[in-house]
Amino acid sequence: MPALPARAARSLLRAVPLRRLAEPGGSLRWSSSRSPSPRLLLSTPIFYVNGPPHIGHLYSAVLADALHRHRELLGCEGGRLATGTDEHGLKIQAAAAAAGISPKEFCDRVSAEFRELFAQAGISYSDFIRTTELRHRRAVECFWAALQAGGSLYQADYEGWYCTAEESFLAASQVMECPDAQGRKQMVSLESGHQVHWTREENYMFKLSEFREPLQRWLCENKDAINPEPYYQQVLQWLEEELPDLSVSRDRNRLHWGIPVPGDSSQTIYVWVDALVNYLTAVGYPEEHRAWWPRACHIVGKDILKFHAIYWPALLMAAGLEPPLRLWVHSHWTVQGQKMSKSLGNVIAPKDCFQHYTVDGFRYFLLRQGVPEWDCDYYDEKVIKLLNSELAGTLGGLLNRCTAPALNPSGTYPIFSEACFPRDLGSGSGKASVEDYKLVSLVEILPLKVSTSFDRFQIYKALESIMECVRQTNGFIQRHRPWKLCPEDPAQRQWQETILHVSLECLRVYGLLLQPVVPDLADKLLSRLGVSPTERSLKNLNFLPRYHGGKCSFEGRKLGPDPGLLFPRLKKSKASHCTDP
Ligand code: MSP
């Protein structure tokens, strides 16, 4: 019976209070076992300023932003989103030297580029941390003191391969010999291909080896601490091997661009220790963090998993703090099958993409196509095809059809007729078909489906579900051809208005749910429907109340002004890079 799924869906929604759905990143099972707290720090990695931002950086930021906005949509106010720039280390020092300016000047310049990009991309961060800020230096110094007080640091001669590009020490098994362009012998990192150098100096060492078991225990007790699952397994596998102690400082003569070790000005703190502490700086460490920590959820790319899943929790434990609540890990964007790199000249600049595809168009593309488990390939035709098909065609077409003056000359939210669309299909009195009841059921459970997908870090799936409903709504209109009905005939007019009412109600749900991904486009859509800014949270959803015998506050209301096409079609070739008139 088609009416049953709708009822089942309604009771399911009622059974799961939205507050519970709002719990970050975990399953509903996880959420229900704890009292919900609005306090959650979502974070992006802090970005290296050795080069300008590219779409890989933007992807990390847009993922975090969409999760943050989704929590707000669910009514969880008071969460934070932290981002920022990672400004110390050898590679920044070298990039500044190559640019012929001081490291500080260089960092100011590139950090501002990231800030500008995030403003343009609508990244709704609450804090932007620069590791060169005084508040961060204080946090790092206190953290170092906590490590020292806990007995986790010692001094020793360190010898090993250091990869400046990765700002990382590598084991012998992670490097290989590979001649350079002139045929000279050099050693490179197996993973990145970047050159490594043998370094020997007296450093401070962190007793990472002592944390192998505590880390294993943490992961066994928190099976959803690292998502998606393959990354969790990968970390467990790393932990099957011995963990060598970690060198956490460098000779200041070689690395002067960084925070000096407190009490030993001959050493600079290792850039990754410095960088990771930014998550504590964001919550006011060492004075105010207790209200927040460990309610932190870090969004990170797969290349920095080891730093976040092994070094960071171990450092936190050593400093007497808990590991973060969760890590969400994403894969990488390649460009036409190749890794993005300056030397290949295939780096995609986000600003160009915004210009060609609009900010929301590009946000939609990244989140719709990006699958955290797999690398995703970028090429222009793919963006154009997706946006033309889904935003211009499927969604824009639906809005056009439902608001066209020819069908809706009064420009108001039309009246729903219970006689045409009775609650019970079995009554046989209405005009709605089995498929129409299925559509209503599908849209009723959509918010739950979308929230579950967000909770599982599967934003692409949330968008897939929304688009499927949009398609079904287009099918509903196509099936009943309201333009063929005669408005002069009262019965036909009633049915015509009901078709439009149901379609607009569906569109209202899609507009609300799309806000975290395409905030401006959703605003355009909702404004066109006459939905005011105070009516845009999921608490106000109340989909199709007339179908359930309730009152609809939109009925008879004037629609908003016509803004023109929701998303103008893009031209096929990137050479023209502009939208059709
Ligand atoms: N500074 C460190 C992070 C320190 S966090 C305590 C860093 N910076 S980064 O600028 O190199 O990378 C920042 C983020 O961008 C990482 O999550 C990284 O995975 C992501 N990306 C960089 N290139 C990428 C792609 N090609 N595709 C997707 N994301 C990638 O690492």
Image (tube, helix red, strand yellow):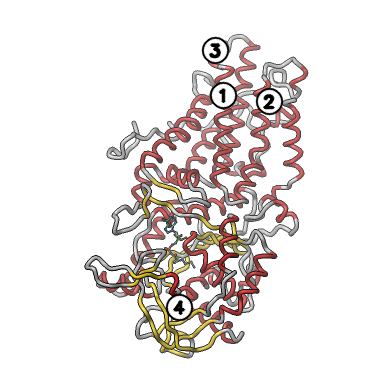
- Closer to viewer: mark 2 or mark 4: 4
Disc 4, disc 1: CB below 8 Å? Answer: no
Give SS at disc 3: helix
Q: Nearer the viewer, residue 136 or 171?
A: 171
Which badge, 3 or 2, is on the more N-terminal residue? 2
Q: Which mark is residue 475?
A: 1
Where 381 sits versus 76, above or below?
Answer: above
Name which residue lies at 62% across and 76% down: 317
Residue 334 vertical position relative to residue 410 in the rendered view, above or below: below
In x, y percent, where is residue 90? 36, 75
- Which image quadrant: the C terminus? top left
Tag nearer the camera, 4 or 1: 4
For the residue marked with disc 1, what is the amino acid?
A: Gly
N-terminal label among 2 and 4: 4
Identify which amino acid the numbered label 4 is placed on: Tyr
Q: Quadrant of the N terminus?
A: top right
Label 3: how many Cα within 10 Å (few below 14, some 14–19, many 20+): few
Q: Which residue is mark 3?
A: 484
Three-letter amino acid code at disc 3?
Lys
Which residue is the site of mark 2?
A: 437
Q: CA distance from mark 1 to mark 2?
A: 13 Å
Q: Residue at x 31, y 36 (%)?
A: 573
Query: What is the number of the mark on residue 270?
Result: 4
Comparing 539 with 207, the one in front is: 207
Mark 4 or mark 3: whose residue is earlier in sequence: 4
Image position of 284 (left or right of 55): right
How far separated are the C-alphas under marks 1 and 3? Answer: 15 Å
